Amino acid sequence: MKKIFTLIVICCICFNTQAQDVNYLLAEGAQLEKEMKDAEALKKYQEALQLSPTEIKALAKASELNTIIGNRLTDKKSRQEYFDAATTFAQTALKVNDQDADANYVMALALSRSSVNSGLKERMDAIKDIRKYLDKSLATDSLYYKSLHLLGKWNADVTGYSVPEKAALKVAFGGLPSTSYASAIEWMEKCRRKNPNYLINYLDLAKAYKANGQSDKAIEILNRLVKLPPKTADDNGYKADGKKLLESLL
């Protein structure tokens, strides 16, 4: 009986130590993201997953960073490898908890990037799935700002589709989904209220306002964007794009 008790104590100590190690790696990853060192952050999240393969936060972060890093690359093969990894991590996260807001968001994000260069049918099928995952993410957390932004962009993108694209989308959905630039603006304004420092949202929001014939609002949003400090490694790029768009509207 004493041996069994000792074994239980040892197991508990090992479990607690491992949990502490995982939490430490997650904290290191988060700090590296703040320092705009995404590749190093990704390694920390992967190290956490070596200790705890079902750690959903690490899975979601690994997926998100693979998508983000892959999107910066110009080589198609390398990009796709990152996008495939992002999809795999997201799928694993969803197996752990298919209602998790992060897990559903990163799956939608991975699909939104990886499907860009796909054939028309595959792209429209992905558009349907992206909406499904975003709806599930927001059903769990209605103020999850990243999903609010991506759903706004989804509305803007679909609204601007060509006639052939809308025909293919109609087949995928069994009817055209209800979208508009006004809806896109509404979702992205919700995102802005929730997180006023999410720079990519400002850029896409300004584009939606412009497409909706509201250049004055686009200018207002862009003037705010160019003054915001960068928070991620991509933010200076968003600010530069915003500045160009602003100059074209003045």
Image (cartoon, grey):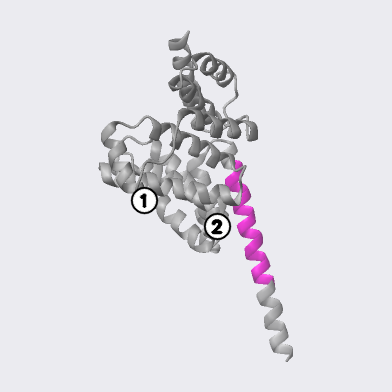
Evaluate if marks 2 and 1 touch, with contact meaning CB atoms under 8 Å apart: no
Q: Is residue 207 above or below residue 76?
A: above
Q: What residue is pinned by disc 1?
A: 84
The three-letter code of the residue at mark 2 reads: Gln
- Span colored in magenta: 13-31
Which residue is under mark 2?
Answer: 99
Gap between marks 2 and 1 measured at Cα = 22 Å
**Residue 116 spot, x, y in % from top left:** 33, 39
Residue at the image point whose x is 37% and y is 29% from the top: 160
Would you say residue 23 sits in the magenta stretch?
Answer: yes
From what the image shows, is residue 195 above or below residue 61? Answer: above
Mark 1 lies on a secondary structure that is helix
Is 164 displayed left or right of 6 in the figure?
A: left
Residue 189 x %, y %? 58, 30
Q: Could you say which is closer to the camera, residue 246 or residue 18?
A: 246
Can residue 203 be seen by looking at this rendering?
yes
* Residue ranking furthest to the bottom: 1
Instruction: State the SS at label 2.
Output: loop
**Residue 125 placement (x, y as % from top left):** 33, 48
